[in-house]
Structure formats: C-alpha cells, structure tokens
Amino acid sequence: MTMDGAGHHVTHYHFLKTELSELFTSISLREFAKRLINIFVPIYLINLGYGFMTTFIFMAIVSFAHVVSSYFAAKLSARIGFKHLIILSVPFLIIYYLLLNSINFVQSLGIPLVLIAIFGGISNGFFWIGYHTDFVKSTKRKDTGKKLGFVRILISLFQSLGPIVGAFLIAELSFHWVFIIVIAILIISVIPLLLRKDKHERFKFSLKDIKFKFGLKAIIAHMGKGIESSVYSLAWPIFIYFFILNKEITLLGSVTSLSLIFSLIITYVIAKKIDKKINLFYKVSAFVNAIIWIIRGYLRTYLGVFIVDAIYGISNTTHTISFNKICYDNARKSKSILEYITIREMIICGTHTVMFLLLGLIGNFHIMFLIGTIGALMYLPYRD
C-alpha cells in the first residue's frame, strides 16, 4: 500500500473513531431494523384488506406528520441537542411498529389508522432533523462527499441484509415476529448514542422566507427528490410484488437487497472521486434514474426486475451521495444549518404527502413511473 493510500485509510479510521462512530453504529442498527420491515409495510396493509387507496393515504399521513414534526423537532433540538433528538425518535418508532403489529386489535379499540401513521411520521421528523444537522456540523466541506460515501458503505452493509432477511423471517415465522425483532434492535441502537457528545443550535424559522433562504432551484430539486422517492418507496414495490413476482415476499426482499448490494459496490468506487467531480456524478446519475423509470413500466419478468433494480442501485446511490453533498455544502453556506435542513425535510416530505395521495388517485402504474421520470429530471438545476 502506498503512503497516500495508507493515509487515506488512517484518515477514515480516525474520522470514525473520533467524530461520528457512535452515530454511525446507531444508524446502522436502526437502518438494518427498518429494512427488515419497512418495504413490506404497504404489502402488510394491503394483505390485511385495507386496499390500495387506504395504504396510499396511510403513507401520506406518515409524510404529513413528518413535515409538521420537523418544525417542532428543530425547535426542540435547540434545547435538548441533536443526539437526544435522534434518541427521542426511537420510542415513537417503536410505538408505530407495536401498533402496526396489533393493528386489528388496535382498530377494534376504536384507535384510528391515522394515529398509527402519525407516530411513524413524528419519529421520521425527529430522526432526520437530528441526523442531517449533526452530520453537517461534524464534517468539513472539502471532504463531505468522501465521508458520505464512507458512511454509505458502512450503513449499506447492514441495509443490504435487511430486506432479504426480513422476507425470509416473514415467510418462515410471520410479520408479528419480525415486528418484535425490529423493536428489539431499535432499543439496542440507542446505546451507542448515549456515549456521544451532543450539539445544539438556536432555531428561528419563517415560512415567508423559504424561497429567499433556500432558492428556487433547490426547492425544485428537493420536490423532485420527494416525487421520485415517493414512487420508488411505494408504487414500485407494490407493482412488482402483485404483478411480476407473483406475491412472493422472498423475491421482493431479494430484489431490494440486490439493489443495495450493487449500491454498496459503486459507493466504494466513487467515494474517493465524488468531491472533485460532484456535478458530473450528480447530472449523469439523474439522467440514468430518469431513463430507468421509463423502462420500469415495461418490465414483465423476474430477470428484468433484477437487472433494472441492480442498475438503479448504482445510479441512485451515486445520485443520493452527490445530492446530499450539494445540500450539506449549501447548508454550511446558509446562516443556519438547522434551518436549512428543516426546510429540506419539509419540502421533500410535503411533496411525499401530495404524491402519495396523487398516486393513489391515479391508480395507473405506467403513469406513476413517468412521474418518477419527471421527478428525476427536476434535480438538474440544482448544483454545487
């Protein structure tokens, strides 16, 4: 190994050991737990008889609760800190999964489905405000992309196992036991954060100033992010599960894990180069994502789904790292990192809310995937 190569690895090791290791360990466990079950939640609801439209409305409520809780999370973080905000997100997530696990009993008590969704949204709002702001404040602009790539590798090691393991456990045991296992892992994920020092930032926010503080191009790009991720997280799994994979839960888990494995490989390749060629990676990956969404509507075989999702795993990971780097760099340039991140979350999840309702009303998957294409192209005006 060359001295430069050795220095590169020592730098990453020092970074992990001294700055964000507790955060990464916690998030890796959390993401593994969520990947065990999250992609299957819409399938779970539909199979229980809630129907496509009810499932889309449920996810819209989760997203709307995320939007509202982001504002309160930012205000609360000024008092308790970002670490404690992440920790506080866990009880809400546990309650969300407990209620889903007992959904028929819960509804027999007169507890509405909307309340379950709200707990999930609050957890998301608290977690992402805490995580994004903490990461930006703990890294420097010149190597954000490199560290984002390194973080992605660590987390993806856990994420890539989640869907296939979750699918196997659901098939062999049941959704009930998977929910219990997920809750246990979430409790364990809190422990590393207890060892981490906390950060605070004062928070002032006004909806009137969003365009001025965030910029029109950034607003369009983050709306595009919300559009594409809405179609990918809900419409795509439902489509392939019911119309291509013959309702095989293990195949759905395998497809998702395969995509994450390919994303892991490409992350290692681009992590060293992303800081120097950020705009190139960003634009090319956005175009590839857009093309893939056009292709998805014409897929009819297992093999086609596996190939397309593998390619998407590569392009979308490249895009996510470059998109987040641009966002984080712009957050550092703003007067308040916390305010910038809060606006980001509100725009993306506000778009999710509208999109889930719209997708439910459309009911045509070809049109949904074309909307995904539009979302991917909306990224393009945004740049470093």
Image (cartoon, rainbow, N blue to C red):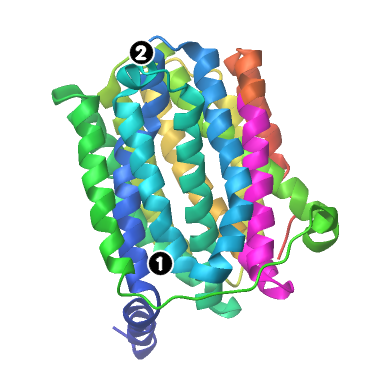
Is label 2 in contact with label 1 (beta carbons under 8 Å)? no
On screen, 187 above or below 54?
A: below
Q: Which mark is residue 47?
A: 2
Give coordinates of residue 349: x percent, y percent. Answer: 62, 42
User: In this view of the protein, which residue sits in the foreground, 339 or 348?
Assistant: 339
Q: Nearer the viewer, mark 2 or mark 1?
A: 2
Q: Is residue 248 left or right of residue 134?
A: left
Q: Residue at x 52, y 46 (%)?
A: 316
Q: Amino acid at mark 1?
A: Phe
Q: Secondary structure at mark 2?
A: helix
Please tell me whether residue 341 belongs to the stretch shown in magenta: yes
Please tell me whether residue 216 belongs to the stretch shown in magenta: no
Q: Which mark is residue 233?
A: none
Q: Which callout, 2 or 1, points at the residue further toward the start of the chain?
A: 2
Q: Is residue 292 left or right of residue 351?
A: left
Q: Residue at x 71, y 41 (%)?
A: 377
User: In this view of the protein, which residue sits in the foreground, 384 or 186?
Assistant: 186
Give the distance between the C-alpha atoms of the residues marked 2 and 1, in whole angstroms. Answer: 38 Å
Q: What's the magenta region?
A: 327-356
On screen, 78 above or below 161?
A: below
Q: Examine the image and state in which quarter residue 298 appears.
A: top right
Q: Which mark is residue 150?
A: 1
On screen, 235 above or below 131?
A: above
Q: Residue furthest left?
A: 172
Q: Residue at x 41, y 56 (%)?
A: 88
Q: In which quadrant of the rendered image does the N terminus lie?
A: bottom left
Q: Secondary structure at mark 1?
A: helix
Q: Is residue 179 left or right of residue 209?
A: left
How packed mark 2 is, by other alpha carbons closer than 10 Å (few <14, some 14-19, many 20 or more), is few
Q: Amino acid at mark 2?
A: Asn
Give coordinates of residue 374: x percent, y percent. Answer: 71, 34
